[in-house]
Image (tube, rainbow, N blue to C red):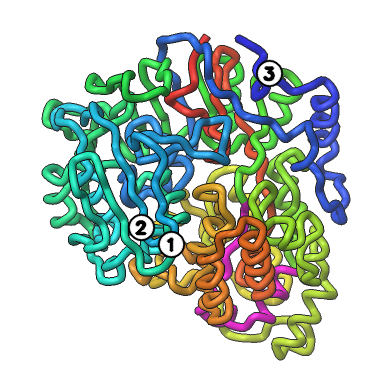
Amino acid sequence: MPRSVARTLLAGALTLALALLLTACGSGGDDKGGSTADSSTAVRGDNGAGGSRGGVLRVITEEDLDSPLDSGHTYSASTFNLLSGTVRPLFRYTPDNPERSVPDLAAAPADVSADGRTVTVRIRRGVRYSPPVNREVVARDVKYAIERGFNPSVASGYAGVYYGDVIGADRADGGPIAGITTPDDQTIVFRLNRPTGGILAEALVLPLSAPVPPEVARRYDARPVGGYSTYAAHQAATGPYMFDARADGTVQGVGIVPGRRYVLRRNPNWDPATDDRPAYLDGLEWSVGNDPNVAGRQVLDGNGMNLGDTPTAAIIKRAVQQSPDQIFFSPGGGNRYAAINTQVAPFDDADLRKAVIAATDRDQMRLVRGGRLLGDVATHFLYPGVPGFEEAGGLEGTGADFLAAPSGDPEVARKYMVAAGYPDGRYTGDETITIVGDSGDPSDKDAELVDAAVRSLGFRTRLLLVDSNTMYGRYCQSPSARVNICPNIGMSRDFADAQTVLDAAFNGTSISRQDGSNPNISQLDDPAINAAMKRAELVVDPQERAQAWGRIDQMITETGAAIPWLWDNQPVVSSKDVRCANQLWNQGHCDPAFSSLR
């Protein structure tokens, strides 16, 4: 296998990695980080060029997918990864460049009018749906795809954020949106109420802009099961791969078996003349329900496998010590934070939220994942590499005293307890705090550490550890569940802009009362922050935009609506014969359309 940049760790980096992993339990709590900027972890991407054709890549995970495989609904890294091989949004990122998008279904870059109120995109000819649909994609399929994102049975988590300024979108419920027109089969036009066309054009990299055949999806969108469309069970592919399916196009129970497996095979209608992705693999098999340590050893010792979950600390240590060519650390994986519900007592009191943050040992939360190579202890929400990160305070943070000590500060916690009306520094109220975390290792350990911090202040707690799909769908993204704290939340940018990290996660207008689809898990609804975001959405100059969103990051941090605890360097572990094209734009997954086997 070629020694590409993304697959090679220098000898000095290995020495540092080993030292950090072996001494993790003794790491000082005052460490401000630095690993993100260190060349030992800042691994760049592999563009996949020159790979070998053939073979099936097996992705092994403990956790099931945490979002349905519907291009109109999905809003998670793992589902983005699988769908990147099966659907073609208007634009996409190459695996090694998360900064500049390239046309995918689009035939050329988007044309944004000088006033920022009109966006025009031409789509390429010759792209066909997988069997049994078979026909060529046309512009009205993209129009329908975006409109269905506003349908409550599809419930896109970001449609309103990036397409909300399209004329008529404010009244959309899945039906036609007046501001989206298709003058011919190859042209789609967006007309907006505000000059936010630049951001809309960037958002066309997201799966919501991938075409959906109305003749297939409409009946499933109109007759939801359990409140949601079942189009995902019958979806048509446009990419080089498709989910394995029966002759009638049904993928549920064949290529999609939730909780067990997801199987991709080649799409016979994919024409490489319309797509510059190499698509070396014959297919991909995603296996769910594996013990994380056993799976990690199988990947390291076996062939043709990639570990789809975050590796445990033990697997990271073994890989660095014994198989350094089989692990790399992808920078810019996103942030990790514990969302605190600001709308449910007792944490509708900001001082109580800040007390919990001050009591939390965020350094230990990093250590149980494997140590400093996993990233810097976070002090705010914009992470390294995102515009606005430095403007918000960079590695040093915003100056908030409740976040100053990575290992926690009991005296600062006591100060905020007193400010909240508890002079002894201990909670004496009646509420029992519900904390819902991810049961997978190492996420369960992080949830337990947050639970310990809350209990140290006198709160009674009820800790539930469930699979990630249940954690999000039934609890954390469901306002009616009234969960107090969700420790295992993360956010990565949707594209190269700070708004994508902060807007959906903390804008009061993003709060959805529909259970299972609320992206603002803290339910933060601060009028000053909402207004600042509305103004910042219109800023065009890159430096001014970074400053505006950096200031918003500071404002959010000051509310104590969440505990930022890690700026992620995502570890990626593969078998020795796997050439993983690092999906830098998507938290370090192996891109199915660029990765290959030796």
Q: Residue at x 61, y 43 (%)?
A: 333
The answer to which of marks 3 and 2 sits earlier in the sequence is: 2
* Residue 242 in the image, given as x and y percentages of width and height: 29, 28
Nearest-to-viewer mark from 3 and 2? 2
Please name the residue that numbered disc 1 is placed on: 115
Q: Which residues are magenta?
A: 335-358
Q: Which residue corresponds to the image point at 82% horizontal and 71% vertical from the top-left?
A: 410
- For label 2, the residue is 118
Task: Decide if residue 29 is on the left or right side of residue 489.
Answer: right
- Label 2 element class: strand
Q: Are marks 2 and 1 in contact (CB under 8 Å)?
A: yes
Residue 338 on the magenta span: yes
Please tell me whether mark 3 sits on a helix, a strand or a loop. helix
What is the three-letter code of the residue carrying label 1? Asp
- Would you name the residue on which mark 3 appears? 325
SS at badge 1 = loop
Q: Is residue 300 above or below residue 42?
A: above
Q: Position of residue 278 (x, y in %)?
A: 42, 18
Across and down, in percent, residue 119 comes to: 36, 53
Which quadrant would the N terminus be assigned to in this image?
top right
- Report the mark closest to the observer, 2 or 1: 1
Q: Is residue 25 magenta?
A: no
Residue 206 visible within the image: yes
Q: Amino acid at mark 3?
A: Asp
